[in-house]
Image (cartoon, rainbow, N blue to C red):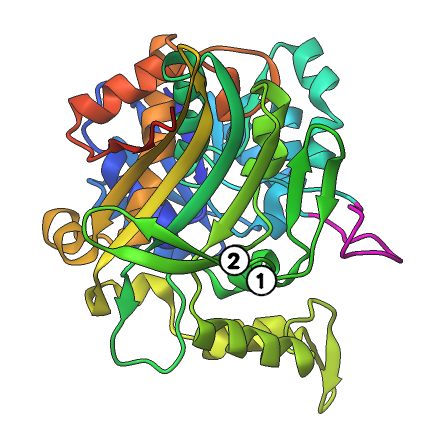
Amino acid sequence: MKVLLVGAGTVGESIARLSAGRHWLERMVVADYDLDRARRVAVAAGGEPTFSAAQIDASDRAQVAGLATQHGVDLVLNAVDPRFVMPIFDGAFEAGVDYMDMATSLSVPHPTDPYHQTGVKLGDEQFARAAAWRDRGRLALVGMGMDPGLSDVFAAYAAKHLFDTVETVDVRDGGDLRIEGYPFATVFSIWTTIEECLNPPVIWERERGWYTVEPFAEPELFAFPEGVGPVECVHVEHEEVLLVPRWIDCRRVTFKYALGAEFIDTLRKLHALGLDSKEPVRVKGVAVAPRDVVAAVTPDPATIGDRMVGRAIVGTLVSGVRGGRPREVYLYQASDAQETMRRFGLQVVGYQTGFNPVLAMELLAEGAWHGEGVLGPEAFDPDPYVALLDRYGIHHAIEERADRA
């Protein structure tokens, strides 16, 4: 497989380095707006002849298409902020190659009732083009990171093997991960953090369809496994709620994230001051988006992996019926920040996000996964994916939460 990797940040570096030495990878072109950064990542992954670097403007569809065509790639892999999803997605289509991302196209809140009704939902722009991708015989695999991604595979696995009837799918992310030495820092892109945390969260119910609530709504204590214990989680906008109901028959889907009271307070203050805005304002004659200023002064997640301590846990809580009895299980993956740095030299969330598209590329290259159109992870057989987790020694587990006879 020949791959154009767009983005050489935290996740892009993880993907490149974890792809190194894989038998299915013929060539990977690491492209970034910062050519020096792309070169550093390409060299760190092993350099020529497998890895090379290129400069790209991810907002320019023609550049994406041109670079994909120039290098004769089979797949364009999007590893940049979701604001660039559509030009990269469209560039791959224009080049006539497959596409993969880890976050879908952005949402737009309802213009008059954002905390009850959806506007443009996550992924809507991409799914609107599904027929065109099918007609061309190409695949766009969307939301194939950690969450969304592995969390969706867990839902598909549970529906296939652990339940006769699925009632609820509730993704719950948390752990005891912390960043030492910084008053405010994020484990992934601050731009994306602001986007998903301050947009209206979406819930799906069979009777109501998709609807929204206020950010950070319905706090709950969720007991995370492996000794972490109860941590407060809140509603956050996330792709699983938009993906799972398309392929898995269930009654309700939610996503909640353990952010912490101090972190939530900081985000609320940014919003109150207008510093979360994507719209440029003029400052001393220069147009700049307030959110870009916040991103510029916030620690780069790629550089603070050695300051992260604790575990990041991503999992999917599924309830339903098995053999006539109610059942509830939590399928999860846990990674320790210090162990990840020691073993791979990668920041823990970058590692967690990055290993998933690498596994998906292997399944596509070998034909274990195949399809046409715009598809989420749930559209594929979860068994080969789980088998790869085991083959590569990636920790995952299933915890029985209740057998409520």
> Is 126 inside the magenta-drawn segment?
no
Q: How many marks?
A: 2
Q: Looking at the picture, which amino acid does disc 2 mark?
A: Val
Which residue is at the front of the view, 47 or 173?
173
Q: Main secondary structure of the magenta part?
A: loop
Name the mark on residue 314: none
> Is 113 inside the magenta-drawn segment?
yes
Q: Are marks 2 and 1 in contact (CB under 8 Å)?
A: yes
Q: Looking at the picture, which amino acid does disc 1 mark?
A: Phe
Task: Find the residue positioned furthest to the left.
Answer: 342
Task: Find the residue positioned furthest to the right.
Answer: 112
Q: Could you say which quadrant of the image residue 246 lies in?
A: top right
Q: Which residues are magenta?
A: 107-119
Locate the N terminus and report the quarter of the image it occupies.
top left
Q: Which residue is mark 1?
A: 216
Residue at image point 56% right, 18% down: 139
Q: Is residue 330 above or below residue 312?
A: above
Which residue is at the front of the view, 374 or 165?
165
Task: Find the residue positioned furthest to the front.
Answer: 405
What x and y, as percent, mark residue 383?
Answer: 33, 14
Which residue is at the front of the view, 18 or 113?
113
Locate the C terminus and report the quarter of the image it occupies.
top left
Residue at disc 2, secondary structure: strand
Tell me the CA gap for discs 2 and 1: 5 Å
Residue at disc 1, secondary structure: loop
Other-residue count near label 1 (Cα within 10 Å), few / some / many at <14 / 14–19 / ≥20: many
Q: Which residue is mark 2?
A: 234
Look at the image and tell me whether residue 294 can be seen: yes
What x and y, as percent, mark residue 50?
Answer: 26, 31
